[in-house]
Amino acid sequence: MSFQTLPTLVQLALQSLLRVEALAISAVQDLPWVLFPPVFKEAFNHRQTNILRAMVAVWPFPCLPVGSLMKNPHLETLQAVLDGVDLLLTQVWPRSCKLKVVDFRAVNHNFWHVWGGAEDHACSPQVIRKQQKLEDLPKSEERQPLKIIVDICLKFCRLDECHTHLLQWAKPRKKSLQFCCPKLQMKVLPVCTIIEILKVFEPDTIQELELNSRWRLEALAHFAPYLGQMRNLQKFLMAGVYVDHCLRKTFTEMEYVHKFLSQFSKLNCLQHLYMNQVYSFSGHMDHLVRCLKNPLETLSITLSLVSQSDLNLLPQCQSLWQLKHLNLSGIPLFFFHFKPIQILLESITATLQTLEFEGCELNDSHITALLPGLSQCSQLTKINFYGNGISMLVLEDLVHRTAKLRQLTHELYPAPLECYDNGSLILDRFIQLCSSLMTTLRAIRQPEKVSFGAGFCSGCNERCVYSLEIKLCSCWQSD
Ligand SMILES: *[C@@H]1O[C@H](CO)[C@@H](O)[C@H](O)[C@H]1NC(C)=O
Ligand SMILES: *[C@@H]1O[C@H](CO)[C@@H](O)[C@H](O)[C@H]1NC(C)=O
Ligand SMILES: *[C@@H]1O[C@H](CO)[C@@H](O)[C@H](O)[C@H]1NC(C)=O
């Protein structure tokens, strides 16, 4: 019988059971395991902490995906679950303890919904039934510690109430439980706080790290050894690393940067690397490139400071030869010798899926240089050339040369240069030229999502966009 088909009568019985707390708590011991999920969910939604605590302690499944019930963090229910874990830990082993994982991640878990035939691995009824049988057999292998899984995503510059509480609870239990943090994201947070977190959550359980922290280089160097321990890191996003002016171009700066970048040689699982507004690594990319071990799927260096020598290294780096996503938006490529980018593109034509050069100050010569490579990228699904100065002639060529790219579904082109007069957009020319380009495009393939965007308006900082319909910037709308 699945929960969807539970008779309403039973549901009503559950609700009235939960109304008498003392009765419910004593009933928990004898509750059939199949009733645990609906009772727990009901008690959770009504924040009946005493019942929750009692149920966690005798939870009859290997997994308790409690995070998917926590729509909003709520300290008392969190506390109740943690108390339940404590209660469970004090029980004399080997009792009927089946719980192996308490999952606080806010992922949508089938566990609570699809009971008839869930495909969710750790918590699926099939696996659970199997484990229920296995559980009765004596175990020779050593007992694994109970796993606590938490994603830590901090929006503000300090830990919130729930995270602080969880961390305080976790510290003294570090030896008896295993703390995992698949995703660690933070905004402006002092380096000492993240080190506190990493003393509890094992760095090698982190798969995704987002540092948005505006640290000074010294803090970055201090953090470096912890980064090196994140051996299972797959996705690393860093933003806002500035140069300290007093350190600029000194030996110390170089030392700090090298200490940080050399950690990349230990990140054997890294697939996605994002650097946004990173100003400190310019001229040091050789160090990074030498340390990259794993083939990357994503390289995104945007709005950052790079040097010619950095760009020259890119096509030589073998870790980049299987790139699926390349984003160099906001790097003023106009000032550089462009050949390395052209060679890089030509070496990744077999794998590349998305290519973004938004606001790179590219001109006709650059696009013409990219075209032979670009027309070979048969996996390409998205291109973004917004915010570059390209003429009608070259845009038409670009559209023709991408004619054979069947997967291409999302295309962002700049409005042709001819739409402007002395820097300002001439609206009817914009509409006329973009409509002509759209017609050309429709004649050669069936585009799905195509936009031609004008430059940002100096008045309202928005673009006029020609797509299925015309979206004018605020200034044009009010004209
Ligand atoms: C590429 O980088 C720009 C600038 O940082 C960003 O706005 C854009 O979302 C990025 N594209 C993707 C697909 O992440
Ligand atoms: C494009 O810019 C490069 C410098 O990056 C310059 O050498 C070239 O002449 C320009 N091409 C056109 C068509 O303006
Ligand atoms: C172009 O614009 C600049 C200021 O935006 C102005 O000083 C100049 O006179 C304009 N030139 C022409 C030919 O309109």
Image (cartoon, rainbow, N blue to C red):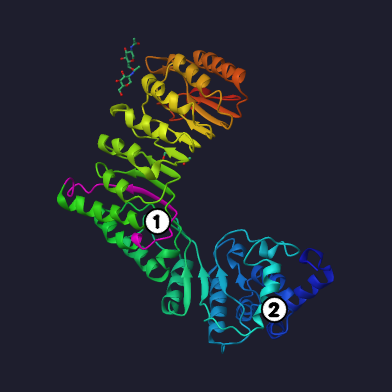
- Can you see residue 281? no
The residue sitting at 76% across, 74% down in the picture is 14
Q: Nearer the viewer, residue 49 or 99?
A: 99
Quadrant assignment for ligand 1: top left
Res. 68 mark = none
Please name the amino acid that badge 1 sits on.
Asn
Q: Do the residues labelled 2 and 1 touch (CB within 8 Å)?
A: no
From the viewer's perspective, tell me whether residue 7 is left or right of residue 237: right
Q: Determine whether the beta carbon of the residue marked 2 sits less than 8 angstroms from the nearest atom of ligand 1.
A: no
- Can you see residue 247? yes
Label 2: few (<14), some (14–19) or many (≥20) C-alpha neighbours in 10 Å: few
Label 1: few (<14), some (14–19) or many (≥20) C-alpha neighbours in 10 Å: some
Judged by its main secondary structure, the magenta piece is loop
Q: Mark 2 = which residue?
A: 133
From the viewer's perspective, tell me whether residue 233 is left or right of residue 284: right
Res. 268 mark = 1
The residue sitting at 60% across, 26% down in the picture is 447
